[in-house]
């Protein structure tokens, strides 16, 4: 019985590693699928399929989408961050940047979570942590502008838009902590997915209805189902589950695995070449993230 807390901790870490494996594959699959499905339709299809799946699971588990009146604004905020901001901007930007860049930028989530936590008064300012965050952002800038300081470049804009998506994900992580403790990881993540899909519906409905589905192959549908079920359902629920068990900084540090895993997959599957600027910027960014998370 004395080993139970240790076993419990190891299980949560296993969950986080599995979650990062799913997330790493997401960057690769999204890059391939978005070549043939526009980001608006892809976001609508991805979130729509996931929302239907979650509603079925909620029905099976007798989970009702009921929240206290005072929590409705926060649930709406989380929902908007999850789909219209994070998922859509990610799928839009991945069309122009590389999976390894996207993964590296998402890997800076711990630093962004720390910054937001300080701004919201949930973390104290410590010189060492601020230095780590600054170093992480220097690394990010190196990667964003690895092809030169050209704001008119699709590649650069793709990287910048990914950064906005990362901010949304970090805010989703910070602001969701209270809700998952109160309502549970499954109910909170399911509600934000379903409501977020409804919020995006006026934007995505027209493009999705008029999309030429006859052009899609079996592999397109397979990739879409991965993005819908593995990422939008399992990865989101696992993320909030871990967040309900341990504090946010310890959860987000596992995102350091994502750039490494995605880069390996990009080289093996997509034949992506890795630039010197990416390696330097990545090393600087991840070093900063690690420093920012040490006490």
Image (cartoon, helix red, strand yellow):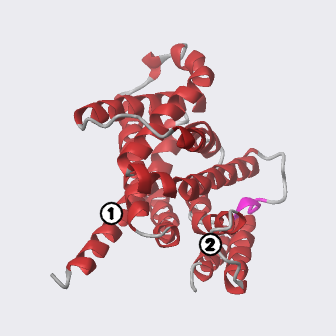
- Comparing 218 with 15, the one in front is 15
Contact between marks 2 and 1 (CB within 8 A): the answer is: no
Depicted 5 relative to depicted 21: above or below: below
Location of the N terminus (image quadrant): bottom left
User: Disc 1 designates what residue?
Assistant: 15
Question: In this orientation, which residue lies closer to the viewer: 28 or 191?
Answer: 191
Residue 201, position as x, y percentages in the image: 56, 23
Residue located at (59% from left, 33% from top): 39
Task: Give the position of the C terminus as an image quadrant.
Answer: bottom right
Most foreground residue, 201 or 215: 201
In terms of secondary structure, where does tag 1 sit? Answer: helix
Q: Which residues are magenta?
A: 143-147
Q: Position of residue 267 (x, y in %)?
A: 49, 60
| Residue ranking furthest to the front | 69
Residue 187 in the image, given as x and y percentages of width and height: 38, 43
* Residue topped by disc 2: 279
């Amino acid at each position: 019985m004395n080993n139970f807390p240790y076993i419990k901790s190891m299980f949560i870490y296993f969950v986080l590693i599995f979650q990062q494996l799913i997330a790493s594959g997401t960057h690769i699959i999204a890059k391939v699928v978005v070549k043939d499905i526009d980001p608006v339709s892809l976001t609508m299809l991805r979130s729509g399929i996931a929302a239907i799946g979650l509603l079925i699971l909620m029905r099976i588990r007798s989970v009702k989408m009921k929240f206290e009146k005072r929590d409705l604004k926060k649930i709406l905020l989380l929902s908007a961050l999850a789909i219209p901001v994070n998922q859509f901007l990610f799928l839009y930007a991945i069309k122009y940047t590389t999976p390894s860049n996207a993964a590296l930028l998402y890997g800076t989530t711990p630093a962004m979570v720390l910054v937001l936590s300080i701004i919201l008064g949930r973390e104290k300012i410590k010189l060492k942590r601020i230095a780590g965050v600054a170093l992480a952002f220097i690394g990010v800038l190196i990667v964003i502008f690895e092809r030169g300081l050209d704001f008119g470049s699709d590649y650069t804009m793709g990287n910048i838009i990914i950064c906005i998506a990362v901010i949304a994900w970090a805010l989703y992580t910070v602001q969701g902590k209270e809700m998952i403790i109160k309502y549970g990881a499954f109910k909170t993540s399911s509600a934000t997915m379903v409501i977020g899909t409804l919020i995006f519906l006026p934007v995505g409905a027209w493009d999705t209805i008029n999309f030429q589905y006859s052009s899609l192959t079996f592999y397109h549908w397979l990739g879409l189902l991965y993005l819908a079920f593995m990422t939008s359902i399992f990865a989101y629920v696992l993320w909030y589950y871990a967040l309900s068990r341990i504090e946010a900084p310890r959860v987000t540090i596992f995102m350091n695995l994502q750039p490494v895993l995605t880069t390996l997959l990009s080289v093996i599957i997509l034949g992506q070449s890795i630039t010197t600027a990416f390696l330097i910027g990545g090393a600087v960014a991840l070093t900063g993230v690690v420093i920012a998370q040490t006490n």
